[in-house]
Amino acid sequence: MNLNVLQFKTDSERLTHDLGHRDRIQSALNKYYVARDDKKARFQDWQAARQAAAETKWDAVNHLDKYLVEFAEKIEARGTKVHWASTAEQARQIILGIVKEKNARRIIKSKVMTGEEIHLNDALEKAGFSVVESDLGEYIVQLRHEAPYHFVFPAMHLSRGEISDLFEKELGTAQTDSAEELTMIARRVMRDQYLAADIGISGANFAVAETGMISITENEGNARLTCALPKVHIALMGIEKVLPRFEDLTLFLPMLGTAGAGQAVTCYNSMYAGPRQRGENDGPEEMHVILLDNKRTHLLADIEQRDALHCIRCGACLNVCPIYKNVGGHTYGTTYQGPIGSVITPHLRGIQEWKHLSSASTLCGACTEACPVKINLHHHLLHNRRNAVAQKPVWWEKIAFELTAILFNNPLIYRLAAWGGRFGQLFHPLIKGSLLDPARAWTKTRDLPDVAPQTFKEYWRARQK
Amino acid sequence: MKVTLFVPCFVDMCYPGVGVSIVEILERLGHEVECPEEVACCGQPAFNSGYWDEARKVAIPVLERLKNAEVLVIASGSCGAMLKVFYPELFANTPHSDDAIALAEKTYEFADFLVTKLGNPDLGARFPARVTFHDGCHGLRELGKKKEPRQLLSQVRDLELIEMGEAETCCGFGGTFSAKFPMISTAMGEVKCASAIETGADYIISNDSSCLMHMQGLLSRQGEPIRTLHIAEVLNSRA
């Protein structure tokens, strides 16, 4: 068993027993469901909107060669420097290069999942730079030295009490149970950081090819300040974020707000089209956009699963996933948690190392139903399982399925199996749930049904006589 | 009409009453029923585990035996989805592709068959109990059947259907998943069962015995009085 599997199994075992965790996540998400359904109902036709969004993303993802170049040319025309990074290492080096060239000391970041993906904070801190997260949830998990629990709601696993304790310990502030006061504490810390920072690093929710802009969706206003106040703005984004036309945002901004947070649109949606232009009196002096591949082109090459690049990182699939709700975000051990993470991580980081995430699913399909851009998520989990086996089958599983094929294809052996089952279950109570029980994985928590005194086939044969 | 009935392996062995009820209902409606002896399993366990070559070894004889059926009825939403949705994918670009597509078109899950093909006939069923309905994920999302089983239950005399909050939430079975990740599976089952119990119903009804097996396994272990029952047995009940 590789370490990722061991960690997943250990953590999921721990969290499935933590009923407090289960209740906390469920009650947070129950509020989300109500808000999401309310906002979905404001769409004239949610299903038609999903279809339109999927088609737009299909166009974008299947013509990245055209749209990325168009985007880069348009945004460079206004003085932005565009960098193309094939790997995480290249992206880190580009960013470190800019930071060093500017003699920067302090860096402020708004929420950027690609930053988590390339372990940017680690790299910056190792090189001696201080980095502060300006998104409240990200700031909280940064203070706790842990990864985001959810790629939209990084601190959703924590109660107000835990956050208050954390602030008291790390910032020396007084205890409070008020969400507003906790937000104000973070805001006071943040204001100084914006003014002191030499460089602001952001992500991008969308990049518009037609106009050469990036679009950032947020609720706290922290991304605006991160992008606008420091002298240099660096935006790090995956290559799949590009949209063909400006008007596409009229669909995608409300869709992201609705699916992601149950909001008609989020509080702030801002477009960034370049550094401060001549005659303008605010904005950064320099702007850099880093287009990150980091194996996205491997996913692009897989025709069957290419639609996973449609993802707008709304998190809707996590919010409805019964696995996610029971094991929590950290258990995955990945940058992107939940169904979309289980689909793409094997492509980004190795199928043999991460195939267990595709197995850890009942294939219930709630994710696919929720996905606003119609990614065939649960079928892709099935495809990952198939691809992993085709590359390297597990020998005993292969033998087991070969044997069951013999069983099911031979009526006589199948009849014997029914008799064997009836015989075996006479003795099963002696070992039920113990280490000797071959069905222990099931019987530890659940009863097994008995083989009936007369199977259906036996009934049918008796009737034919 | 001549109906070919496929009673999947675990229903055959552990829940024969489901198959018997389907036979009795269909015969009462005047249809001829055949149940091929050779057909035992659809191949879903191997398929879902990624072993598609091994799945085909099980599925090819099923396909060969059933391809000439006039209409195929399956006593499980999950196995129904396997034949209707996944066989065409499993056999894509193989010599069996056309047969798989043709079979998929004439395959029906039992509850769907009664409503879609037979027009929801009154079966004269009476079941004096309060019940809640569990939507099996395959029946609901692969086959897209939500209202059909409820339409059937609405005709049952003295039956009161109380919907649970988590009706569409997975019960946590997931085939081999339940053994590979038993604690996640159990936690999901607990959430599901708690929602069913909350309705105060006497029975959890579904058109998928595999989900019912999982929920019943948990409920029995925890000593909960609520029972699980396949919809065919409810519809065949004349008490």
Image (cartoon, coloured by chain):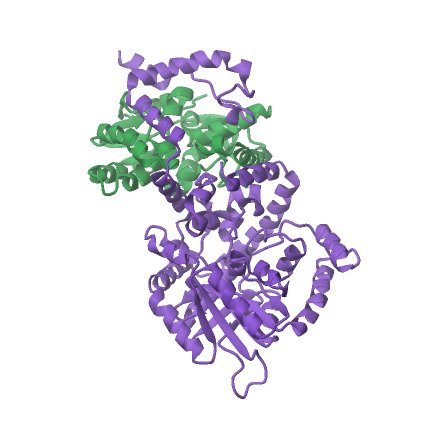
The residue under the point 58% across, 35% down is: B194
The residue under the point 52% across, 75% down is: A287
Q: Is residue B188 left or right of residue A395?
A: right
Q: What colour do you see for chain B?
A: green
* Horizontal and vertical percent position of residue A362: 46, 38
Between B136 and A70, the one lying in front of the other is A70
Assign the N terminus of chain B to one quadrant of the image. top left
Q: Is residue A454 visible?
A: no
Q: Quadrant of residue A11?
A: top right
Q: Is residue A155 visible?
A: yes
The residue under the point 46% across, 18% down is: A450
Count of labels shown? 0
Which residue in the rendered view is the most extreme toward the bottom?
A: A279
The residue under the point 62% across, 73% down is: A198
* Horizontal and vertical percent position of residue A44: 44, 61
* Horizontal and vertical percent position of residue B181: 51, 34
**Location of residue A132 with respect to A307 vertically, above or below:** below
Which residue in the rendered view is the most extreme toward the right?
A: A174
**Location of residue A387 with respect to A48 vertically, above or below:** above
Q: Is residue A106 left or right of residue A374?
A: right
* Horizontal and vertical percent position of residue B114: 34, 33
**Location of residue B220 with respect to A273 vertically, above or below:** above
**Location of residue A165 with respect to B32 vertically, above or below:** below
Q: Quadrant of residue A359?
A: top left
Between A44 and A419, the one lying in front of the other is A419
Q: What colour do you see for chain A?
A: purple
